[in-house]
Image (tube, rainbow, N blue to C red):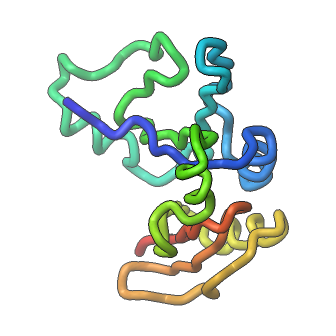
Amino acid sequence: MPYLAHISLLVRDYDEAIAFYSRLGFEVVEDTFIPEQQKRWVTIRPPPSPLPNSSSAMQQIEPPNKRMEQEPSSKSALAPSQGATILLARPSNIEQEAFIGNQIGGRVFLFLATDDFERDFKRFSDAGVEWVRPPKIEAYGKVAVWKDLYGNLWDLIQYH
């Protein structure tokens, strides 16, 4: 069954992006130099969520004989229930470079769900995140919009 494995996020510099996201609790999944292309394959992900039934929901959808019962053979070969990782990608040309920080035209790009909005709002604030829209209660949950180090917009959201 197909699943979303990675989402590319254009960055100016791998190490400054790793440092920024690490302060927010993200984990480096893989950081491998690719000599043929003179670039690195760097993937990150937020810490695993303690949301109830977050991994069991995917396992219930998959037939029992199709479940991944072993560890992936590669760090980037994640099971669908582990979610997509973010590929930190340096631009390959000047056209791509123009989109650093504005990958989708000023809209919120990524939605980071949390099980404890107040904890993560404080942690992100303490790490120096710039909040574009303050916390607000919506019909679906509590949400605030923040900018990453390049200007991409993210939602921090706790669903009801």
- The residue sitting at the left extreme is 63
* Residue in view at x 38 percent, y 40 percent: 55
109 to 90, vertically: above or below? below
* Residue in view at x 67 percent, y 74 percent: 118
Count of numbered circles on the image: 0
Camera sees residue 112: yes
67 to 104, vertically: above or below? above
Residue 47, percent across and down?
62, 45
Camera sees residue 88: no
- Location of the N terminus by quadrant is top left
* Residue in view at x 69 percent, y 72 percent: 121
- The residue sitting at the front extreme is 94
Residue 142, percent across and down?
51, 80
Can you tell which quarter of the image residue 44 is in? top right
57 to the left or right of 78:
left
Can you tell which quarter of the image residue 41 is in? top right
92 to the left or right of 4:
right
- Location of the C terminus by quadrant is bottom left
Residue 65, percent across and down?
18, 17
Residue 13, percent across and down?
75, 43
Can you tell which quarter of the image residue 99 is in? bottom right
* Residue in view at x 62 percent, y 17 percent: 34
2 to the left or right of 6:
left
